[in-house]
Each structure stands twice: as C-alpha cells, then as structure tokens.
Amino acid sequence: MIKIAFFDVDGTLLKMGHKELSERTLHALTSLRQNGVKLCVATGRGYLSAPRFPGIDFDALLTFNGSYVTVGDEIIFKCPLDRVDKLQLLQNLKDMHRAVAISNEHFIITNGTDPDLEQYFRFGNEMLKIDKQFDERVHEDIYQMMCACREEEYERILYGTHHTQITAWWDRAADIIPLECGKGNAVRAVLQHFGFTKEEAIAFGDGFNDIEMLEAVGTGVAMGNAKDEIKAHATCTCKSVEEDGVYDFCLEHGLITI
C-alpha cells in the first residue's frame, strides 16, 4: 500500500517552462491526499523556488536536490557545501570563465550571466540576480551551486574537491551539491521521519538527478519523456508529462479514481 509519494517538478509535475499544474495532474495530487497519501516535492530548485500550488499543501519539501529538507516549519535534514570545496569550485569556474549561481534558504544570486544559465533559470520561471555582495555572501552556508556547462567539463569543475558532486537534468547546465546529498538520501531521511518503509513509497521523475530517488523507493516511475538511461533505473514508466503521465499512472494503478 502506497503511503507517501515523491514528485520531481519540472518535466514531471509541470510541463517545461509552465507555472501551473494541468487540471488532471492537480486532480491526481488532490485525490492522493484525500486517500491518505503524503505528498512530497523533490526538486533541484532551491527552497525559495519550491513550487506552491493553490489547494496543494506538500508534506515535505526536498530542495536543492536533497541538500535541504523540510517538513512544515521543521528542518529534518540539511547539508551545505564543504567550505574548502566551495572556494575551490569558485576558482575552477573562474578559470573556466563561467558565471555561477549560489543558493541557500535565503537567496539565489549569481556573480555573472551567460545564455545557458539564463535559460536554465527560465525553466523554473526565475530570473538571474547578479549581486554585488556575491563575494561576501558565498561564505554563508550554500546548499547548491549552478553553472552552465557540458558533461565533458564536469571533471574540470570538480578538480581539487573531495566532498562535492555534480547532478544534472539538462545537458547544458548542472547543479553542484554535497557528496552526502542527492534526492535518494533525502527520500530516505523523509521515510525515516514519517516511519514509512521503502515499499510504501512511490516516486516520479524524468531527469538524471532523479535516478537515486527512483531507486530509493519501492516503486520508481520514470516519465515517458525521460531518457532511456533514466528509465533503466526505474521500476516502471508512465506517459510523458505532456500526456499527464502522473495522473494516468495513478488512475491505472488504482491510486486514485476519476
């Protein structure tokens, strides 16, 4: 019996670039809640950017790809970037002439811009904010960095770091997070908090940063718009976000009714 559900946002609950849920996806979430299923968002977005949908109160927010997890007003897990690694990453990106965004529960700022990074933010309906105090604010706890890059640049970005990893769902930008984090670890923290087993949990996702989450639950559902490499890590697949895959799967498997 499913007691808790985890959802990626962009490309899973929301069509890319959209702000509002489709009518059928909204119905799916509402019906799951009415059936006693706890609802959780697991997103690469920061805490300030986590989606708020009218009529839907999520039981847990897993933000920054799992680096910062809240249940209501309670922080149940947080893991900022290692301070030494953080400075090394900034130097590496500076040497690569890459702008970088930093984020925590209070701000999302950047030291510059470029077209790919701007597009990355637009996917979440956000705008880059260049902050003159970037060099000072970077010394605060930072849960995630974001930069434009390609996969072949990952090694160079991480050069000299020891407690940091890259996760990505788009091939022209990446999220830089602590090695001890990721959506999988965050899901396990939430399950422990509520006292649920892996088998009582379901998750929906479409990106490479969702793989750990799909493997951390009993039923990991890859969206139809996910790449084959992601589907290979899932228990099963559903229709694409464009076809309201979450709704269709929940209806087909008796988790909700029309």
Image (cartoon, helix red, strand yellow):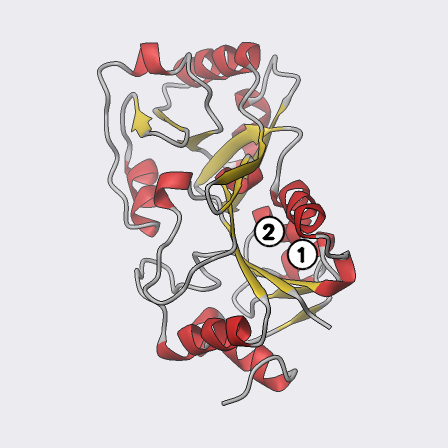
Q: Give amino acid for label 2.
A: Asp
Q: Which residue position holds label 1?
A: 214
Q: Is residue 219 visible?
A: no
Element class at badge 1: helix
Q: Residue at x 58, y 46 (%)?
A: 209
Q: Residue at x 71, y 60 (%)?
A: 232
Q: Where residue 21 appears, x then y in whole percent?
A: 36, 68
Q: Residues within 10 Å of mark 2 (few under 14, many from 20)?
A: many
Checking the image for residue 210, the label placed there is 2
User: For this rendering, which residue is in front, 41 or 167?
Assistant: 41
Quadrant in which residue 186 is drawn: top right
Relative to 152, does residue 11 appear above or below in the rendering?
below
Q: Residue at x 24, y 40 (%)?
A: 127
Q: Give amino acid for label 1.
A: Leu
Relative to 5, does residue 88 appear above or below in the rendering?
above
Q: Is residue 233 visible?
A: yes
Checking the image for residue 53, the label placed there is none
Q: Going by the image, does 25 lie left or right of 156?
A: left
Q: Where residue 201 appears, x then y in whole percent?
A: 69, 62
